[in-house]
Amino acid sequence: MSLTRGALARMVDHTLLKPEAKPEDVTALIEEGLALGVLAVCVSPSMLPVRADGLVVAAVAGFPSGKHHSLVKGAEARLAVDQGANEIDMVIDIGAAISGDYNAVLSDILTVREAIGPTTVLKVIIESAALSDEAIVETCLVAEKAGADFVKTSTGFHPAGGASVEAVKLMADTVGGRLGVKASGGIRTTDAALAMIDAGATRLGLSGTRAVIDGLAT
């Protein structure tokens, strides 16, 4: 796929979710994001509020395990929105998806959607590397039913791995353009990023954004 540096940057959530992150690291993330022309920065909710004029601010909820009570995820997400987050990336209960309890997954997502209201962008992290193809499809459909705006591959912290081209394609085929698809987790090169976009990703979660963008000449 042929993209300019600027067009690629505008698909990126420039991300810092390391547990050892300090306020000055978040400041540096924002400054780099502005310099690179990214769309958004994504941070842990404990780092909010941040001053990021010109950037979308995303925060995570239920991160990284997804094993928080749904009401806790909802409260965490609501607090993040109250502190300036424009988008929420929530982690589902992965075990519920693996066991086929999609009603539990639906309830989990609905709780967060109701907590943040209809105007905040909601991305649902399904941890695709840990799921079967059937579970990926069903979880994406549940996310759509619950009012999500995006389905997202991964936290980047799961031992099963991060984003894959195959998972992104399956997710994109399932949601059929009705939802966005965010590829995240282990995308470290320009070629990998472009492959995810070719497969149907409409947003990328990157921590090494500069290296990915620098792979394009213009």
Image: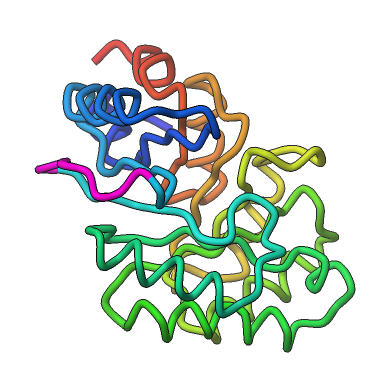
Q: Is residue 210 above or below residue 3?
A: above
- Of 184 and 78, nearer the camera is 78
The residue segment tinted magenta is 47-54
Q: Is residue 203 above or below residue 131?
A: above
Residue under the image location 47 percent in, 58 percent down: 89
The x and y percentages for residue 196 are: 55, 39
- Quadrant housing the N terminus: top left
The x and y percentages for residue 46 are: 40, 48
The x and y percentages for residue 145 are: 55, 86
- Of 213 and 51, nearer the camera is 51
Residue under the image location 45 percent in, 29 percent down: 21
Image position of 17 (left or right of 185): left
- Of 74 and 191, nearer the camera is 74
Residue under the image location 57 percent in, 46 percent down: 199
Type of secondary structure dominating the magenta stretch: loop
Q: Is residue 183 magenta?
A: no
Image position of 47 (left or right of 110): left
Number of numbered tags placed on the structure image: 0
- Quadrant housing the C terminus: top left
